[in-house]
Amino acid sequence: MPDEPSQHEPAPSPAAPAEAMPRRIGIGINVLIQVILCIAIFGGINRLNYLYYSRFDLSPAQNFTLSEATLNYLGKLTRDVEIYTVFARDSKLYGEVQMLLEEYRLHGKQRVKLRSIDPLRDIERAENLKNRTGLSLSQNGVLIISGPNKRFITEDELAVRETGTSTNKQIIEFRGEDAVTSALVSVMEGRVRNFYYIGGKGARSDSAVTEALTALQEIGQQLNFNVLPLNLSDVTALTTHADGIILLGCRYDLNEREIRMLDDYWNGSRAGVLMLLDPGRSTKNLDQWLANLGVKPRGDRVIMALSTSTGPKKEFSVQAEFARDVSFTKHLANSATTLAGQTESLELKGADDPLLKEKSVRVKPVMKAADHFWGETQFYDDLPVPDENEDAYPPVYVGASVERGVSTDAGKNVDSSRMVVVGNTTLLDKTTMLAVNRDFVAASLNWIINRENQIGITSKPRKSYRIQLTPRQSEIIFWLTSVSMPALVLLIGLMVWAGRRAA
C-alpha cells in the first residue's frame, strides 16, 4: 500500500499572489490622487470665494453702504491714494471709521491703500508719518494722501454732536462718507475753490451773519472750498475773483454798478451764485435782475392760517419738500424740511418763455411748500384769507435753480452759469438748521461749481435702540443661556463618550 501522508506533516502553504504588491501601489496612487484632487478643489473654491463674493450691510441705517456718487468716483480714480486712520482704539468712532474706510478700499479698484495707526501704541509709525507729512497729528482723524496733496480730516468733522453745554455730548449723526469723499476729491483736484460772501449789504442781525458764515466755513472745510468776504465797492469785476458768489439775506439793494458787475459775472464763461433772500429786504434792483432770469420774488409770506376754537392760528414756519427731477435734490426727495422764520414765494417762468429761450436760460423749481401753505400778501392780518387775484396758490415754490448756457452734451455743461435761489434766509441759522437743510446747501454749492460727483452723499443718523424686558423674559433668557444650553452641550458630550465606550 502506498505510504499515507503523516498526520504530523504540515500542509503546503498557498503561494502569495503575484499581483499583491502592484495592487498596493495602485491603491496608494489612487489615494494620493484623491488627496491632491481634494486639495485642488478646496483651494479652487477658496480662490473663487476670495475673488467673487457678496457683502451685506445689515445695520439699520445702512451706515456702511457707500452712496452711488462715491462708488462712481472711486471707479474713476486715476491715481493711487493712501488713507491712514490715525485713531486711538478707544475712540467711539474707531469702529465705524475703520469699517467705512474698508469699503473705500474694496471699491477703489486697487487704487486705495488703507493703513491704520494707533498713535498711542504705534508710536514709531506715527512719528514717521508726522515727519513725512509735516502734520502734528495731535488728534484723531483720517489722513488722505495722493501725490504731493494731502488732507487731514479731524474727528470732529466726521460726526455731529448734540448741542448744549454738556461736556459729554452724544453723537447724533455720522458724516464719515461725506467728509472722506470730499477730502478725496480735494486731494485729487489739487486746488481749493473760493466762494465769496458779499458783505456790506445788511442782514437781520450781526449774529445771523456770524452763524451763517460759520456754517458755510464748516461746509467749505468738508467740501474743499474757502469762504472769503468781499465788498463790491472794493473791486471792479467778479470774473477773476470767484468760483462762486454767496448772498445771504441782503437787506440793502445793489447799486447800478454792482448790478452790472453781477450781470457781467453771470454772463461770463462760467458763474456760480447762491442766494438766500430775506423776505423783509428792500432790493428793487436785485429783484428785477432775478426776474429777468425767470425768478421773480413775490414779496409775500408763505403761511398757513385757520380759525380754531382758541382763536386764529397763523403759521409762518413752512413745511417744504424737495424736487425729485433735479439732479442735486433728488437724493433729498424723500426728506421733508421746515423753513424757520419767514419765507416768500417765487414766481418762476416756464421753459417756453421766449426771453429765457433767447438767453439759453432754464429755470427749475427745487423746493416747494406743502399744499396747505400759500403765498399771502396781507400776512399782517390776524386771519388772512387767500385771494386768487393777489396770492400764490399751491404749488408754492420757495426755491429754484437757474442755469444759463445749458447744452444737450452733459460734458459741455462745465461752462454753464448756475444759480440757486431760496426765499428764506434761515437755512444756516445755528438754532434752527436741520441736517437736511445743511445737506441741501452743500448739494447746491457742489452743483454750482459743477462738482456733481459729490452730490447725493448724506449724513447717517446715529440711533440708539433700547430693549425693554419684563422680569419673566429676563428669567427665561437666564435659564436658556446659563443652564439649558450648557446642559445640552454636556449631554451631547456624554452621549458621544458612551457610544465610544460601547464600541
Image (tube, rainbow, N blue to C red):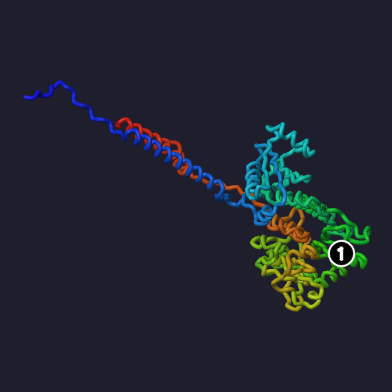
Quarter of the picture holding the N terminus = top left
Q: Between 320 and 143, which is closer to the camera in this rendering?
A: 143
Q: Which residue is mark 1?
A: 265
Q: Between 348 and 186, which is closer to the camera in this rendering?
A: 186
- 399 relative to 109, above or below: below
Kindly identify the amino acid type of the residue bearing the numbered disc 1: Tyr
Which residue ends up furthest to the top in the rendered image?
8
* Residue 497 drawn at (x, y percent): 35, 32
The tally of labels here is: 1
- 449 relative to 352, above or below: above
Quarter of the picture holding the C terminus = top left
Q: Residues within 10 Å of mark 1 (few under 14, many from 20)?
A: many
* Residue 66 drawn at (x, y percent): 64, 52
* Residue 358 drawn at (x, y percent): 81, 75
Image point (76%, 56%), residue name: 428
Q: Residue 143 lies in what quarter of the image?
A: top right
Q: Residue 401 lies in what quarter of the image?
A: bottom right
- 358 relative to 76, above or below: below
Query: Is residue 21 shown to the viewer in this render?
Result: yes
Q: Between 289 and 279, which is closer to the camera in this rendering?
A: 289
Q: Is residue 234 left or right of residue 50?
A: right
Q: Between 46 and 214, which is closer to the camera in this rendering?
A: 46
Q: Is residue 11 left or right of residue 146?
A: left
Query: Is residue 165 shown to the viewer in this render?
Result: no
Q: Residue 35 lies in what quarter of the image?
A: top left
- 207 relative to 325, above or below: above
